[in-house]
Image (cartoon, rainbow, N blue to C red):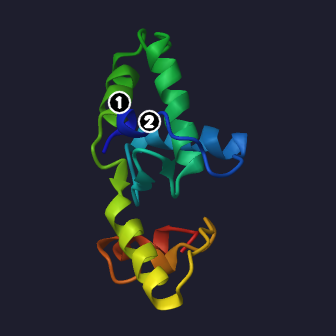
Amino acid sequence: MNYYDIQCLAQINEVDGDKVDELVASMLENGWQGAPILAIPDSMLITGSHRIAALRTIWDRYNTGEYEDNEVLEAKAAELLNNDDIAYDVTDLVEDAFQSYRELNDEEPEFDFDEIGWIFEGTEVEQWKSEIDEW
């Protein structure tokens, strides 16, 4: 999924403006690096508050023409915003994990954004666990 697929989803954590600024500079220089933002596209982000804030800053600057005088930055911003590796749809994985939890415990699980490893253990998302602080 790209930025436009997740742009309307709310951040799950407060963000540090300095970290967002660092991410903006890094993304424009190096492109998308690391794990994708985990998201349920119809409802929420699971990870990536700082990265979505950085992408929103890039989109705002791109959309208002701030990069028009710099063809390289304008092209990098457009490429970044359209990169389909930015986000990963985990809807089915979350639903499956919650269903398994309900069957084992006869109760609804609490969703703690700071501890998501149990949801994605043994799935394709596990490949990024060393990059996901919330794991």
Position of residue 13 in the picture relative to residue 103 (left or right): right
Q: Are marks 2 and 1 in contact (CB under 8 Å)?
A: yes
Q: Tell me the amino acid under the disc marked 2.
A: Leu
Q: Quadrant of the N terminus?
A: top left
Q: Which residue is mark 2?
A: 28
- Per the image, label 1 sits on a secondary structure element best described as helix
Q: Residue at x 62, y 51 (%)?
A: 12
Per the rendering, the mark at residue 76 is 1
- Residue 107, picture quadrant: bottom right
- Residue in view at x 50 percent, y 11 percent: 64
Q: Is residue 67 above or below residue 21?
A: above
57 versus 63 height, above or below: below
Give residue 58's position: percent from left, percent from top: 49, 28
Q: Is residue 83 left or right of residue 73?
A: left
Q: Give left or right: position of 73 versus 50.
A: left
Earlier sequence position, callout 2 versus callout 1: 2
Residue 89, x across and y down, in percent = 34, 55
Secondary-structure class at tag 2: helix
Tell me which amino acid carries mark 1: Lys
Foreground residue among 12 and 79 = 12
**Residue at 59% from the left image edge and 68% from the top image edge:** 111
Residue 75 appears in the picture as rendered? yes
Give the image location of residue 75, x and y in percent: 31, 24
Res 4 quadrant in image:
top left
Residue 63: image tag: none
Residue 73 in picture, x, y percent from top left:
40, 24
Q: For residue 90, say whether it is visible.
A: no
Using the numbered discs, state the Cα–Cα distance from disc 2 to disc 1 in whole angstroms: 6 Å
Q: Residues within 10 Å of mark 2 (few under 14, many from 20)?
A: many
Determine the residue positioned at 36% across, 37% down: 5
